[in-house]
Amino acid sequence: MGLFDSVLGAINKGQPSADGSAAAGGLGALIAMAASNPQLVQAITGMLGNDGQHGGLSGLVEKFQQAGLGDVVGSWIGSGQNQSVSADQFTNVLGSDAMAGLAEKLGVSPDEAAGQLSNVLPGLIDKLTPGGEAPQGGLGNSGDLMGMLGGLLNRR
């Protein structure tokens, strides 16, 4: 748990973003939510990690494409402006059963879990794909992703 503790330590420092905004690139929102609900960080790394139940970033991209929202998730990976996604759209992408399971882990309602993800994931995926392309091998397993997330938070 040492790496997770160090990530949470970086989160709890509450360092201001370079542009002073609370939600710079989605990381401010992640920090705020993770400080009050660290299970969110674990849920996100589980979702984006290659060893996660959704097949990592590529699996998530595929789910968005199947739901007709490929351009939305593509904007998060690409170098342009991130398109937003609603909580309802996120629930449609993952499915209500998966969202209910995630909500249970987070200790919130499914709607609130979907809202948290829709607020955080666009900016986070954007930061994890700085070259404007998804890495060929994905983002790594959830442990690798936790390390990447810790690095992003420490650079804030």
Image (cartoon, rainbow, N blue to C red):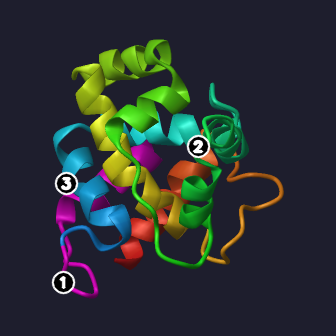
* Amino acid at the residue labelled 1: Gly
* Residue 123 in view here: yes
Work out how far the residue at label 2 is from the one at label 1, CA to CA, in angstroms. 27 Å
Q: Say which element carries label 3.
A: helix
Q: Is residue 5 visible?
A: no
Identify the residue position indicated by label 3 in the image.
32
Disc with the residue nearer the chain's start (3 vs 1): 1
Judged from this view, the residue extending furthest toward the front is: 68
Give the residue at x 70% y 33%. Answer: 55
Q: Looking at the image, which residue is at 43% across and 28% down?
A: 91
Numbered range of the magenta stretch: 1-21
Would residue 149 be found to the left or right of residue 144 on screen?
Answer: left
In the shown orientation, is residue 89 left or right of residue 143? left
Task: Say whether residue 138 is magenta.
Answer: no
Q: In which quarter of the image is the N terminus?
A: top left
Name the quadrant of the C terminus: bottom left
Q: How far apart are marks 3 and 1 (CA)?
A: 14 Å
Amino acid type, callout 2: Leu
84 or 25, which lies in front? 84
Image spot of residue 150 (x, y percent): 44, 60
* Element at label 2: helix
Residue that mark 2 sits on: 48
Residue corresponding to mark 1: 20
Do the residues bearing badges 3 and 1 touch, measured as CB atoms within 8 Å?
A: no
Q: Dot 2 surroundings within 10 Å: few (below 14), some, or many (20 or more)?
A: many
